[in-house]
Amino acid sequence: MFFERTRTFAALFVFFICIASYGRVYTGIEIFLSKYTGLVKGKRVGLVTNPTGVNGNLQATADLLKADPRINLTALLAPEHGIRGDVEAGKNFSGNRDPQTGLPIYTLYGGKDHRPTPEALSKFDVLIYNIQDIGCRSYTFIWHLAECMSAAAAAGKTVIVMDVPNPAGAVEMDGPIMQNKYRSFIGLYPIPFNYGLTVGELARYLNREEKINCKLYIVPMLNYRRGMSWEETGLPWVPTSPQIPSAQSACGYSVTGVIGTLGTINMGVGYTLPFQTIAAPWINADHMAKYMNSLNLGGIRFRPIHYKSYFGLFKEEVINGVQIHIIDPAKFKPTTTTVAILCYLQKNYPQFKWRSDRNAQFDKAMGTDSVRKMIQAGRDYKSIVATWQRELNDFSARAEKYKIYK
């Protein structure tokens, strides 16, 4: 357990690591319920969660806390997709009551700032956050957490983050640091596109480096090691959103999600491999696979693929391209891979077009317009990647002291 204001209980955490049997990973919520419920004794508790907030037996955090006599759960705060996952992506929803617990739900999605309302803040003293992360800046859940931390700091509330694995391995930091002019809810603070931290570590970083300064506890995992694949954690995967049904899709999103903003390439959304493909009618699958594999990008392989999409872009057309296989998350550099793919498409296919009505979306997701402009100018991917390396190294050095796991 880590308390951000005054001291770090690192010795206690190391003790638990030493006695661990090195079986599956135990997530923060499991460690909290086993050891640290005293943190909320006599307090009213709010909970930010969604369907991914589960223990190793797939029991929902909301149900676990509500049923625990040691915990006074008084309110639920819902991110994008809602507490139980029944809300479409990008859709706002008004608060109601959770049918399982009977507790009031306050939406964090929609409105101008995605923060807890004054009414919601009045319902709790301590706010618990338990949502599975995917390690990518453009995924909104981490920004719900950041806004909750900011609101809690202003209101004198405590935040407790239940740490979870990063399916991308929490090793490689990759991509440009977001520029302030592209600040949005897919990038509130200047961090790289792939930040190489767990959500608990990121919370520690943002709290200090961005001067949020809330009273913050991180409940760490047991048996987690940097570079772990999701399969190595021994945990079941719960879809983090409707088009992220697997850990492979979660890792693939970090590569193809930003490409999807262009509206010219099918990334497997609409097929059985969401965010795991790059395909279009005019791509030569064998050529693309051979070329991309020749780059020897770390931790990834490309396989030729041909399919028909059931819905979305190129619906019911035969399209060709590559399937992305992440074989080693510890060596995987998602944004480098994104840029290498786009440079290949730019050089080899005149059918690949940059749409003026979509460029702003791409730039916002990437956190800069420089990457797009360099690709359009015909720069090779290595020279583009080199442009963000100095700032990335600076971020990595600052983040080092917030890491919890080896």
Image (tube, rainbow, N blue to C red):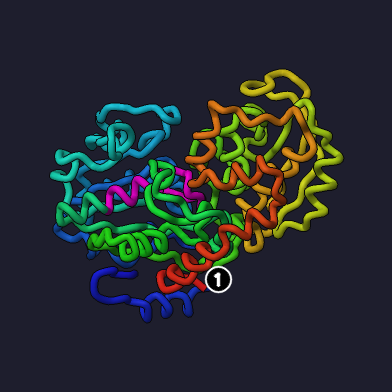
User: What type is the residue that disc 1 sits on?
Assistant: Tyr
Q: Give the crowd class for mark 1: few <14, some 14-19, many >=20 residues within 10 Å.
A: few
In this view, 32 is above or below 108: below
The residue closer to the viewer here, 367 or 133, is 367
Q: Nearer the viewer, residue 37 or 116?
A: 116
Which residue is rendered at x = 66% and y = 36% of the image? 273
Judging depth in this view, the residue of 46 and 118 nearest the camera is: 118
Q: Quadrant of residue 330?
A: bottom right
- Mark 1 falls on what kind of element? loop
Image coordinates of residue 141 in percent, x first then y, are: 40, 45
Find the magenta span and give its range.
Answer: 131-149
Image check: 45 left or right of 314?
left
Instruction: Give the position of the N terminus as an image quadrant.
Output: bottom left
| Location of residue 160 by image quarter | bottom left
Q: Which residue is mark 1?
A: 22
Q: Quadrant of residue 33?
A: bottom left
Camera sees residue 374? yes
Give percent across and percent down for residue 72. 19, 50
